Image: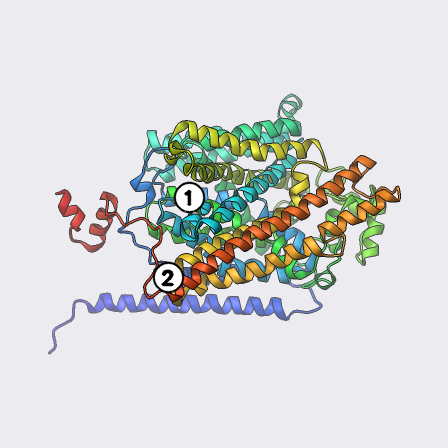
Amino acid sequence: MEPENPLAPETGRRGHRRSLRVVAWTAVVLAATVAWAVLALTRGERINAVWLLVAALCSYAVGYRFYARWIAHRVLRTDDTRTTPAERHDDGADFVPTDRRVLFGHHFAAIAGAGPLVGPILAAQLGYLPGTLWIVAGAVLAGAVQDMVTLFLSVRRDGRSLGQMARDEIGPVGGAAAVVAVLAIMVILLAVLALVVVNSLAGSPWGTFSIAMTVPIALLMGVWLRVVRPGKVLETSVIGGVLLMAAVVGGNWVSQVPALADAFTLAPTTLVWLLAGYGFLASVVPVWLLLAPRDYLSTFMKVGVISLMAVSIVVALPEMKADAVSPFAGSGSGPVFSGSLFPFLFITIACGALSGFHALISAGTTPKMVQRESHIRPIGYGGMLTESFVAIMALIAACVLEPGLYYAVNSPAGLLGSTAQSAAHAVQQMGFSITPEVLHRTAVAVGEDTVVARTGGAPTFALGLSHIFSEAFGGGTLRAFWYHFAIMFEALFILTTVDAGTRVGRFMLQDSLAGVWKPMRNPGWRPGVWLCSALVVAAWGYFLLAGVTDPLGGINQLFPLFGIANQLLAAVALSLCTTVLLKQGRLRWVWVTAVPLAWDVTVTLTASWQKVFSSDPDVGFFAHRGLYIRAVAEGKLLGPAHSAADMQKVITNSTVDGVLAALLALLVAAVVADAARVWVKALSAPNPLPTAETAPVAGKAAADREEAHSGTPSAAAEARR
């Protein structure tokens, strides 16, 4: 008789679990295949929004489990035995080892701004299918890859900024072009995001109170987690979550008490100054005290609302009222924005698919807080997938509305007129059905005077969210509540990108000045921290204040550059990623970042070319300038101008936008060209080229992890003993 094998039961259990995993993942792949088939093959009939939900979630799951894992292990070769910058330089201010759950919250909140809410709503003009394909495929194959690889590179380089890494790895010419482009683009992006916050909070006591309360709540969470009850993340999360819900409910109560409502109803200029002060404060105080806990707190609200929206879609089963592919996709003459599907879909939907702004965070605050390299995948890749899911929810919110209502809300006032009657007539001329009565009833249902020409995307998201929530919970009686809740939610969503972005801008400016001013080489030098923070805030604050006080000035002048600038920034990040892989001799895997880079450069430079040289005044900046110059010569006024002075401002704005679009494209082209020089050198070299990667250090934390993993004392641990 053969002796019984004591390992057989355990081996059998492992085999059983493996079989269950194979079955589960096969089911996920089949569900994704069926959902995508329904989306692609359905023609001329309405489908349920649940199909978009299933297609996106299953694709994200497969991408994270298999593609991201393969990149982390095979391409990047993450190693938990190496110490991270947070461990080596722990200073209690910028470099702080942070629990991966808290850091995920910070990273997600910092990257998820206006883009995933606004971009998909505007792109709904082209139909739901192109946007869905780009959001999901772009995130899985490009956006999440960029975020994770950039984060990995920064962690391996002492948390260096994007511009500094480009200078170190590409060279002085491409690096200098990258630094100038990144700083200029960052100022534009921060000012645009801040403008959206100001517009959302102006005249909204509910939103202003709720968001103001997140600051003291975050301070309490930071002190509680670091001083009172160190390491108690779950306990701190419960405290923060309960207080946040109280702040949201309290905001609704404040808005209904006249004296309190007046106190929290602030003018746009007041909000600008408060926002600038908050941005400076968030940039200079220790990251554990305000920035990280506030972003973590915000993530409760963001993920919670989006998850509730997904549940509501499953409960209410709303139909997609928009076409799969609209006539505007080919004509390029839509009322919401001008331009054909290629390349402008990929510029309009940036955050949620592929966003250069994310690379600033991945090479900014986040790498200075990573505890171990295995956390890079859930934070970098997982954070981007979470934001992409937000973009899918925003697209659904726009497409469950009747097309006539969608165009009445998102078309400009110059096209719709000032009344419900004129708006209904204009929408009917586009070929969609809407009546003045429907527009009036919709406005009354959400507690607004009008919903006509409420452009910018935010009101449409609020309308869609309130429609879905009211169908799933509470009926139409709660629609006004959900609408105003969504407006507050959007402001909270966007503000977290402004504070983190300001801190990242401070890091970049410190890195840039370190070469010419010796004290700046110490990132913790307090005068340098205050000076660089003040300069960054002053830069975006100037454009924000000018834009708030002048409808044709300040950041309003640069707003048309937002989409292109963001995607040009992605080209810089992906060029850096591709360069490092080639210098390290990883030619076999370089397609992981090279393919997204080639796509992004093609799309973005094509869009830049059209914006500069197109003869269509609705597309080309200089064509638009020429149209207004001819109108001035003929003594005519064209909207949005109301006077001869306004006409001159429009001419100036179009000129500035055209010149800046060309300059930014040239700067990024210089970065890519200089990177290509390095690629050729790397391909022809017999051995891998040296990089700026920090030499591995086996510190106490890393040694302890190695010992726990292997079960035997590591060399570093033995040395300590």
Count of residue discs: 2
Q: Where is residue 315 in the image (x, y as percent from the top left)?
A: 58, 54
Give the residue at the far top of this rendering.
Answer: 259
Q: Which image quarter holds the N terminus?
A: bottom left
User: Cα distance, mark 2 to mark 1?
Assistant: 21 Å
- Look at 82% across and 41% down and name the residue there: 418
* Mark identifier at residue 366: 1
Percent position of residue 140, x then y: 49, 60
Identity of the residue furthest to the bottom in this view = 1
Q: Say what amino acid the circle numbered 1 marks.
A: Thr
- Nearer-N-terminus badge (2/1): 2
- What residue do we see at 43% from left, 63% from top? 680
Rendered image quadrant of residue 550: top right
Q: Is residue 259 visible?
A: yes
In the structure shown, which secondary structural element does the residue marked by tag 2 occupy?
helix
Under circle 1, the secondary element is: helix
Q: In this view, does 717 lie to the left or right of 257?
A: left
User: Label 1: few (<14), some or many (≥20) within 10 Å?
Assistant: many
Is residue 697 or residue 130 the one in the foreground?
697
Question: Counting other residues with Cα less than 10 Å from the Cα at mark 2, is it few (<14), some (14-19), or many (20 or more)?
Answer: some
Residue 591, percent from left and from top: 45, 65
Q: As drawn, is 642 to the left or to the right of 252?
A: right
Q: Residue 273 carries which label?
A: none
Please state which amino acid type lies under the numbered disc 2.
Answer: Val
Which residue position holds label 2? 75
